[in-house]
Amino acid sequence: MASTTAPPSSPPPAGTATASSSADDAIIQPGKAPGQTGNRIFTGLSFGAGTFIMVVLALVAAFLIREALPALTASRETLESVSFMRDRSLWGYVAPLVFGTLLSSTIALGVAVPLSIGVALFISHFAPRRLAQALGYMVDLLAAIPSVVFGLWGFLWLVPLLDPLNTWLSEHLGFIPLFADYTAPAKNITTASLVLAVMILPIITATIREIFLQTPTLQEEASLALGATRYEMIRQAVLPFGRSGIISASMLGLGRALGETMAVLMILSPGMGLNLRVLQAGQHQTIAANIASQFREAYGLSVNVLIATGLVLFIITFAVNSLARWIIARRSEFSGAS
């Protein structure tokens, strides 16, 4: 039986070993990591942007404190020279403005947040895709409407529309101080708050919608697989996941409502009351609207008084945002979210 011998292996082609060793050397050759320069540039820009924002915030606070200091240190007799003070102390003048600002913003937030959650849920989980896209565009476009247009809409359309409702409430529920002593037209804190609610609705809705769309699909499918209906799935998976986002969106809307000027100035009949008569005109005023109405004729110490009220609004806004950050951080810690 003939024995078979393996043919001798042919030598590798010339240059193969050299190419392989060269490739290995290229792989293990030390050098700069790819993208290192870009990472440094991005880090520097990010750090610079954050530092710039903090510097601007500090400069604004320093300006407000410096300009408000003459009013904060002035005696009551000196402040009597300011015409719109009407023999009030500085804090006696600021307190009704703070109350009106917080009251209007609270009413607006109480109306806008439930509506925003409902609209965001409909867009993200109930509406067909084309309808959801159209509604999303419409909500986003509402945010681009100038505040003066909202003010005109509220003055020309909403005030006459609310007059019969306010009259009915005052006649049938007037024994409750909240609805007592209504007189037409409806240029009161309620109408102004409803306009504010419409103004902050787009930013709250858009933020909540994006949060709801980020709900993990596995959580939704797991809830449905266990026999939950769509409404139960939303209650069990979507709303708990978006709770911190709802708080963040609400605080964004509250910041817009606290500082809104033109719409409130065009609708609200101003007053300096400290009460909850939300249907009565001439009872309340906000800080921003008061500054806009008085600043044109202000001079000397009166300018410092108005800037002092602006400093109070700055502190309120800063406190509200800090509180929101603290609440979100605690909820993230308890929920285990990163």
Image (spheres, rainbow, N blue to C red):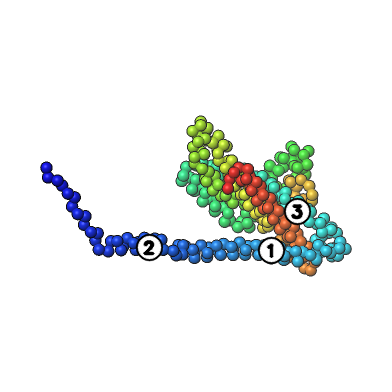
Residue drawn at (49%, 45%), measured in percent from left and top?
A: 132
SS under mark 3: helix
Work out how far the residue at label 2 is from the one at label 3, CA to CA, in angstroms: 72 Å
Are there few (<14), some (14-19), or many (20+) residues within 10 Å of tag 1? few
Name of the residue lying farthest toward the right: 77
Q: Which residue is mark 1?
A: 58
Q: Which residue is mark 3?
A: 98
Q: Which residue type carries mark 3?
A: Val
Work out how far the residue at label 1 is from the one at label 2, CA to CA, in angstroms: 54 Å
Q: Which residue is mark 2?
A: 25
Q: With respect to residue 231, does 80 lie above or below?
A: below
Q: With respect to residue 209, does 26 lie above or below?
A: below
Q: Which residue type carries mark 1?
A: Ala
Observer able to see residue 119? no
Residue drawn at (80%, 64%), measured in percent from left and top?
A: 71
Q: Position of residue 126 (x, y in %)?
A: 51, 40
Instruction: Give whichever of discs 2 and 3 has the lower sequence position.
Output: 2
Are there few (<14), some (14-19), or many (20+) residues within 10 Å of tag 3? many
Observer able to see residue 210? yes
**Relative depth, front residue between 8 and 85:** 8
**Relative depth, front residue between 155 and 64:** 64
